[in-house]
Amino acid sequence: MEAWADEVIAISEVAAPGRAPVLVGHSMGGLVSIVAAAVHGEKRLAGAIIVDSPVRKPDPESDEGKGGRAFRSPKKYPDLETAMAHFRLIPDQPCEHGFILRHIARHSLVQTPEGWTWKFDPRIFMRFRTTSLRDYLVRVRCRVALMRGEFSVIVPPETGEYMYGLLNRNAPLVEIPQAHHHLILDQPLAFIAALRALLADWEHSVPRQRAVAA
């Protein structure tokens, strides 16, 4: 996670040298953003907006945090259209904007000598750990805001409230109406409106000092 966070910061500094960016991350990208804000936030970020990315209460009965699992190897398809027809959101949810799904599906596929297949690495979560995310969240040293979809199964209300508490209730917790986990896809205009409002406020206000959580 820290290696990914380092890469995000390095890319931002090449793209906009001399300017501390506001980092916006969704889902797994939001978890990386939490780590980046904890490790680099004080000097290299102007803020971080965490979008439907869960930091859950520790559960001693759960296997969560003990390492991820490998997905099955991506299937091969004879042609592009057949492959695109098999594209699905995870977790499953409705999305009215089919043209956006087709765009993502097309750019998630690559042609190989054996046919069309998905680009993702099925082993991506094998060394993925979630146990330390709470520690990173309480260490964030820049402005931070939380967003969640109203109907998200990844960040339900209790998870959002838990994260809000870890930040000492000193960070906005914004709920996007009528949105599921992939809120950028199913409510893009509401998401952009909320994002613009947060950034406008940050530009014209002074951040409150946040005490370090115990």
Image: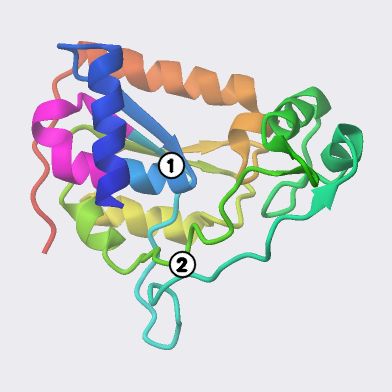
Asked whether, in this view, residue 134 is left or right of residue 153, the answer is left
Q: Give the residue pinned by disc 2.
A: 126
Mark 1 or 2, nearer chain start? 1
Queried whether the magenta region covers residue 9, the answer comes back as no
Please rate how many residues cluster around mark 2, counting C-alpha atoms within 10 Å: few if below 14, some from 14 to 19, many from 20.
few
- Residue 79 location, x and y as percent? 89, 37
- Residue 176 location, x and y as percent? 56, 35
Residue ID at (9%, 29%): 43
Q: Is residue 104 visible?
A: yes
Please rate how many residues cluster around mark 1, counting C-alpha atoms within 10 Å: few if below 14, some from 14 to 19, many from 20.
some
**Colouring:** rainbow
- Residue 4 location, x and y as percent? 32, 44
Q: Is residue 111 above or below residue 150?
A: above
Q: Quadrant of residue 72?
A: bottom right
**Is the C terminus in the top left, top right, bottom left or bottom right quadrant?**
bottom left
Q: Give the residue pinned by disc 1.
A: 29
Which secondary structure lies at badge 2?
loop
Q: Return the residue nearer the eye: 46 or 12.
A: 12
